[in-house]
Image (cartoon, rainbow, N blue to C red):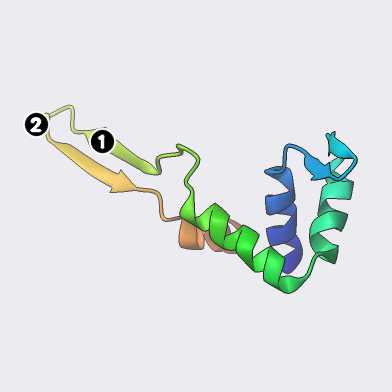
Amino acid sequence: MADMAIATHAMSINSIITPEGGDNVELSDKISFLSEIPQSFYEKITKWTEDNNFGVDFVYTTLCLECDKEEKRSIPLEDFFSNLYTGR
């Protein structure tokens, strides 16, 4: 599970800026970078991504074609992947 979390964060990195400048890097390099940073830095990155939704809205509106009733629903991300892998 930790490897999946690191890979997910790695995919969201556009570039890594070093004292020599910014550079677009391969996914494998991003994963290596995140795997090697201190745990406290990784926790800061994780907290930042949880606090910022990047404009993605996981709420959608359904409309009944029979009665025109609208209902807002949200996509439950907390167990989405577990359902995917367990077939629920």
Which mark identifies residue 50? none
Residue that numbered label 1 is attached to = 62
Q: Is residue 6 left or right of residue 88?
A: right
> Quadrant of residue 19 in the image?
top right
Query: What x and y, as percent, mark residue 10?
Result: 74, 49
Judging from the image, what secondary structure is the residue with disc 1 in?
strand
Query: What x and y, as percent, mark residue 6?
Result: 73, 59
Q: Quadrant of the N terminus?
A: bottom right
Q: Which residue appears at 87% of the width and 56% of the height?
A: 32
Q: Which residue appears at 53% of the width and 60% of the height?
A: 83
Task: Choose between 67 and 46: the one closer to the eye.
Answer: 46
Residue reaching furthest bottom? Answer: 39
Q: Which residue appears at 49% of the width and 62% of the height?
A: 79
Q: Which residue appears at 82% of the width and 63% of the height?
A: 35
Residue reaching furthest left? Answer: 67
Residue that numbered label 2 is attached to = 67
Is 67 drawn above or below residue 88 in the view shown? Answer: above
Judging from the image, what secondary structure is the residue with disc 2 in?
loop
Question: Are the residues flagged by discs 2 and 1 in contact, CB closer than 8 Å?
Answer: no
Is 65 drawn above or below residue 14 in the view shown? Answer: above
Q: Amino acid at mark 2?
A: Cys
Q: Amino acid at mark 1?
A: Thr
Label 2 and label 1: CA atoms lie apart by 12 Å
> Quadrant of residue 47 in the image?
bottom right
Task: Choose between 83 and 29: the one closer to the eye.
Answer: 29
Residue reaching furthest front? Answer: 19
